[in-house]
Image: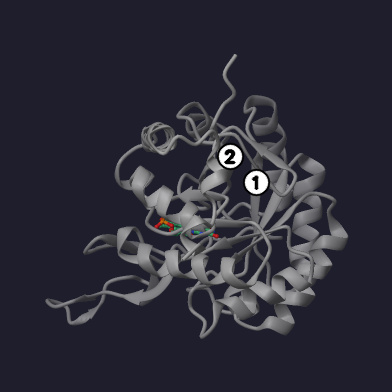
């Protein structure tokens, strides 16, 4: 039997293919995560969950931009105590790795949520230290290497599962935060979260989002995220998950060539549909065949050979 050329490994996670659902795009429910698994994703990441329930912001929370969307949802979530039973249920239903995205206001909170998520069955946790529109949660931690190291160390001590750190593009030097996360023991890095943005209504002469400011995602940010992956791969030896604007198989291959081991897809699912996973996986398979390569692992970081 021919081996699967898309099979790859991310820290200790075995993936059937290098695509994953990005955090926040289809929420938390077992049904929506199952839909993504059936659509061909290699892994799923849940929407970010915190220690206590949070309402999120009133509408409008999403606005269309050219070639992307700007969102400020405000991290609505049921809290980890409530969500733990859904994690257990999801684990019984899906066969692909379940990565639970975690946020907090302190390092201790991140650790507590990660511990509960792991006990409920999460295969890995992804730390959202990069939400650009909720004050004092992740983004401040993700922009401060000292706070980031402390948070990653405390989470590592609270779980035996891989700890993935989702980095913010809203920093002067993303390599510095990538290095801080790595020093503290991060098993993988996701690059990146959304880019700080705003939209203004010319009729009302006011910002459109209820939170005023938000984060831009979709094709508009792809070159920014791609450069983040390229720069991190050059300096840091931790597996990277590319995230930002992946819509076609060519986008996915660009991220792999830049140094990503896997990629996450968000806005393309919201704007198209989950069939994007199969389309991207087919495209990568055809690319490998055309290049006469047996495994997707062989193209990771290839753009650095010049
Ligand atoms: C509506 C929406 C909600 C999001 N919620 C979260 C979240 O809860 N946690 C998180 O880490 N990232 C969240 N993100 C960011 C995405 O996971 C991803 O990093 C970003 O959208 C870039 O990828 P994309 O261009 O493929 O969407 C959200 C993005 C969108 C559009």
Q: Position of residue 135 (x, y in %)?
A: 55, 78
Q: Residue furthest right?
A: 157
Q: Position of residue 202 (x, y in %)?
A: 14, 78
Q: Position of residue 16 (x, y in %)?
A: 59, 32
Q: Is residue 251 above or below residue 64?
A: above
Q: Is residue 306 above or below residue 97?
A: below
- According to the image, what is the colour scheme of the structure? one colour
Q: Under 8 Å from ligand 1: the CB of mark 1?
A: no
Q: Are marks 1 and 2 in contact (CB under 8 Å)?
A: yes
Given residues 289 and 183, the one toward you in this image is: 289
Evaluate whether residue 157 shows in this view.
yes
Tell me how many marks there are: 2
SS at circle 2: strand
Q: Residue furthest left?
A: 203
Q: Residues within 10 Å of mark 1 (few under 14, many from 20)?
A: many
Q: Residue at x 38, y 35 (%)?
A: 290
Judge depth for marks 1 and 2 and give the one in front: 2
Sequence-earlier tag: 1 or 2: 2
Q: Residue at x 55, y 38 (%)?
A: 29
Q: Position of residue 178 (x, y in %)?
A: 64, 72
Q: Is residue 60 above or below residue 179?
A: above
> What is the spatial separation of the Cα atoms under label 1 and label 2, in whole angstroms?
7 Å
Which residue is identified by label 1? 99
Given residues 296 and 282, the one toward you in this image is: 296
Which residue is identified by label 2? 43
Evaluate whether residue 61 shows in this view.
no
Q: Residue at x 72, y 81 (%)?
A: 147
Q: Residue at x 44, y 66 (%)?
A: 225
Given residues 38 and 210, the one toward you in this image is: 38
Q: Residues within 10 Å of mark 2 (few under 14, many from 20)?
A: many
């Amino acid at each position: 039997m021919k081996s699967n050329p898309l099979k790859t490994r991310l820290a200790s996670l075995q993936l059937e293919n290098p695509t994953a659902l990005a955090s926040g795009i289809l929420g938390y429910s077992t049904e929506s995560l199952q839909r993504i698994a059936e659509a061909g994703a290699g892994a799923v990441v849940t929407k970010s969950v915190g220690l206590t329930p949070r309402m999120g912001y009133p509408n409008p929370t999403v606005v269309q931009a050219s070639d992307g969307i700007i969102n400020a949802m405000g991290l609505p979530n049921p809290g980890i105590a409530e969500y733990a039973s859904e994690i257990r249920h999801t684990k019984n239903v899906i066969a692909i790795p379940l990565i639970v995205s975690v946020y907090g206001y302190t390092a201790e909170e991140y650790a507590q949520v990660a511990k509960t998520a792991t006990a409920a069955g999460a295969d890995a946790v992804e730390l959202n230290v990069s939400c650009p529109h909720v004050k004092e949660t992740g983004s401040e931690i993700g922009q401060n290497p000292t706070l980031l190291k402390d948070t990653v160390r405390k989470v590592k001590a609270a779980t035996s599962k891989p700890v993935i750190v989702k980095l913010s593009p809203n920093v002067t030097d993303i390599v510095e935060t990538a290095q801080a996360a790595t020093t503290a023991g991060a098993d993988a890095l996701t690059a990146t979260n959304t880019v700080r943005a705003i939209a203004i209504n010319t009729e009302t002469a006011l910002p459109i989002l209820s939170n005023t400011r938000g984060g831009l995602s979709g094709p508009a940010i792809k070159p920014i995220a791609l450069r983040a992956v390229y720069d991190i791969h050059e300096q840091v030896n931790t597996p990277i998950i590319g995230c930002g604007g992946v819509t076609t198989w060519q986008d996915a291959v660009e991220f792999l060539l830049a140094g990503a081991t896997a990629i996450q897809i968000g806005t393309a699912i919201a704007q198209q549909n989950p069939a994007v996973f199969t389309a991207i996986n087919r495209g990568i398979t055809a690319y490998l065949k055309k290049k006469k390569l047996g495994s997707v692992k062989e193209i990771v970081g290839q753009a650095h050979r010049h």
